[in-house]
Image: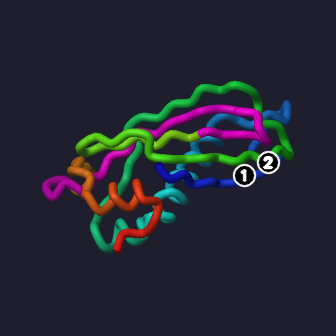
Amino acid sequence: MPIARHVVRIEWGDCDAAGITFYPNYFRWFDAAAWRLFGQAGFDAATLMASRGVFLPIVEAGARFHRPGWLGDELVIESRVAEWRDRFFRVSHAVRRGDALVLEGFELRCWAMRDPEDARRMKAQPVPADFRAALEAGEPAA
């Protein structure tokens, strides 16, 4: 499966008082990296919402921390779709500082549209074949 790479430099505002990355920031960076992956395949957020009325909400997320990220570190987040289900897909993330693995994480996302009976709710729909094919190929859908 194709991989998207997202580079982050840890700034002071990303850290706690000890100069270590405050852990919620990794989830913010996971989201940015996932959207880079989707955009690489031709499915940026604005296009999905405007043309298909689709959202890709996260229904589960997690991380395993191996070592801290420090102020000034440059991290590379490598993201890919690791698993496909009918209405859901898992995006895996590996965060590295040079050759060192800092953490591994994942997001379970679903292909969702607004519920026509209640606009405050979403309903999971089957993941379309063109979306899956584009992400598996790593290039925009035709």
Q: CA distance from mark 1 to mark 2?
A: 6 Å
The residue that appears at 23% across and 43% down in the rendered structure is 86
Q: Which mark is residue 74?
A: 2
Does the magenta stretch mainly form a helix, a strand or a loop? strand
Other residues around mark 2 within 10 Å, as few (<14) / some (14–19) / many (≥20): some
Left or right: 128, with 1 as reference point: left
29 with respect to 119 (left or right): right
- Residue at 77% x, 38% y: name it: 99
**Label 2 SS:** strand
Q: In which quadrant of the rendered image does the C terminus lie?
A: bottom left
How many numbered marks have been drawn onto this rendered protein structure? 2
Is residue 106 found inside the magenta-colored segment of the image? Answer: yes
Residue 125 is tagged as none
Residue lying farthest to the left in this orientation? 117
In the picture, measured across the screen, residue 126 lies left or right of residue 55, that is left
From the viewer's side, name the closer residue of 114 and 87: 87
Kind of residue sitting beneath label 2: Glu
| Residue 133: x %, y % from top left | 34, 58
Q: How is the image coloured?
A: rainbow
Circle 1: residue type: Val
Vertical order, 8 against 88 (above or below) = below
Q: Depth check: 17 or 141 in front?
A: 141
Q: Does the magenta run of residues contain 13?
A: no
Residue denoted by label 1:
8
Q: Residues within 10 Å of mark 1 (few under 14, many from 20)?
A: some
Residue stretch rendered in magenta on the structure: 94-118
Residue for point 49% across, 64% down: 39
